[in-house]
Amino acid sequence: MIMTRGQKIFNICNIVFLGAIGLSMVLPLIHIIAQSLSNSVAINAGQVSFWPVGFTLGSYKLILQDPSIWVGFRNSATITVFGTLINLLMTAMLAYPLSRPEYVYRKTVLLFVLFTLVFSAPLIPNYLLVKQLALLDTLWALMLPMAISAFNLFVMRSFFMNLPGELIDSAKMDGCGEFRIFWKIVLPLSKPAMATMGIIYAVAHWNRYAEAVFYISDRRWIPLQVRLREIVFTDQYGQSDVTSELLVMLSPEGIKMAVIVVATLPIMLVYPFLQKHFIQGMLVGSIKS
Amino acid sequence: MAKVETSDRMMYQFTTPGHKIKFMRKHWPLYVLSIPGIIFFLIFRYIPMFGSVIAFQDYNIFKGIRGSSWVGLDQFKRMLEYAEFLPILKNTILIGLYDLCFAFPVPIILALLLNELRIMAYKRIVQTVVYMPHFLSWVIVGGVVVGVLSPSTGIVNHLLSMFGIEPIYFLGENSYIRSILIGSGIWKDSGWGTIIYLAAIAGINPDLYEAAQMDGASRFRQVASITVPCILPTIVILFLLQIGNFLDFGFERVFVFLNPLNSENGEIIDTYVYRAGLVDRQYSYTTAIGLFKSIVGLALIMIGNKFSKKVTGDGLY
């Protein structure tokens, strides 16, 4: 294809512009990593931009000595692992019957679920329910009330509907029961979809913040995001058994930034994987629904 | 939002109720599988809906719903008369409007520009990078904003000081909070928002472009006359959905930035309901506010659906 002069100029501008947009997404994160690895003198003098100055791992040492960070990490990891398992099981168990024509109340149940998407109850009745179920100040409060996302349910249902129907029919011919079909045929065939959805759910659990603010006041059960918000916005970082010389070397800003890096790390580690599987999966889902 | 297909693969017709029951009994495991999910929605979605009746009560936690006295619409009256609520409603509406004006168009423009990139490897790198912030939590996004905007150590104030401008404590001033809220939203989600538009663009019939090239249409002309009209239905649907969620800016993304210095312009319904409801325990009053928000949201979605049917010939749901 022959390009006119104007098109060439546009192409170059476009490449530069989108490059700048991309950089604006990455540079703040690099700035933060650089600060977390710099000493207080450099940070306070404003020498740190995108590369550590006066390299030190002190900020990381300090926050890893703070037991509350570990408590948060453990709680977040727990709700991420178990919460996601609950999510996948519950979502698949409801999505599968809804994908089968033999389930005669399909439409009724779909409307029943759809309504929860357009009309949601206010905060207080939700809070009172969690309280009444004695889930307040337990990690269950961060797993059970969000056991099924209606949106993900619809995505998974449309995935099940696209499985070849003949497979299920032939299994039935061989005398396979419905439970066995679900467990031994449908679920193994859906591994890619389940992995995709598992990651969507897992990221949501790791990032969960609002519900923790609403339902958890016992400090033993706060997830990492809550602790992170305290440290970053209210300057309460680890005090207890920290040597004072370490504190002198570090600036509060550097410590805050180190906490952010630590909390972001797990997401960054799964991101390449996310990129590969999930964006295609998401595309399929969003086109369908 | 997902849509319920009106015509699924097939439907069974039953002549008598007896047949239906027999058929269901034959496929009983399917019905058993669906029970936990249905119970979940009943307990965690529908019970709180019915629990919203405390908006019409003077709810007392010790007396429960049955024992508390009914006050009719008093809580709603109080909401509208109370001087504290109106500024918060105004904030919520303004922030929603700004979001619609400034954040909504960004993914469309980005998707159109990304689609014009002809170097595939470069396109993929840019996409990978712009999707990434979507996966960070609002707390982390807040932390990034704090780091970048910090008056003493942040990079923005360093740049400003190069031009001789005094450091600004952006998070400590009422006048900046709305821009910060909208801006951080654009940073986090506009890249992610391109996905759906890129999918719509990928679905356009390539013959259209070929024919346009034959007729000598420039690339700009092709975008204006083919790409934009073809993705218009998607834009309209997403726009209407966004209007439906107009008051639902989100609790977390505001709450992380909120402090006493900026709450005058930053407090929205969700954060107010948390503060006045959960912290100050005004259960009935804040449930009335929440119910007001949910009903407005439902009405907006229903209006959006009507519009959508008129404009695109297809409902939202």
Image (cartoon, rainbow, N blue to C red):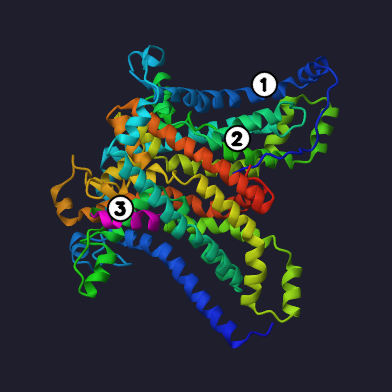
The part of the image, by quadrant, that contains residue B56 is: top left
Is residue B184 shown in magenta?
yes
Q: Position of residue B67 (x, y in %)?
A: 37, 12
Q: Which mark is residue A114?
A: 2
Q: Which mark is residue A258?
A: 3
SS at circle 1: helix
Disc 1 and disc 3 on one polypeptide chain: no
Q: Which mark is residue B32?
A: 1
SS at circle 2: helix
Observer able to see residue B217: yes
Mark 1: few/some/many CA within 10 Å (<14, 14-19, 20+): few
Q: Is residue B197 above or below residue A69?
A: below
Looking at the rendered structure, the kind of residue marked 2 is: Leu
Looking at the rendered structure, the kind of residue marked 3 is: Ala
Observer able to see residue A222: no
Mark sitting earlier along the chain (3/2) = 2
Q: Position of residue A249 (x, y in %)?
A: 17, 56
Q: Main secondary structure of the magenta part?
A: helix
Residues at badges 2 and 1 in contact (C-beta under 8 Å)? no
Looking at the rendered structure, the kind of residue marked 1 is: Val
Q: Chain of mark 2?
A: A
Disc 2 and disc 1 on one polypeptide chain: no
Q: Residue furthest bottom?
A: A5
Q: Nearer the viewer, residue B11 or A70?
A: B11
Q: Magenta stretch: give its range.
A: B173-185
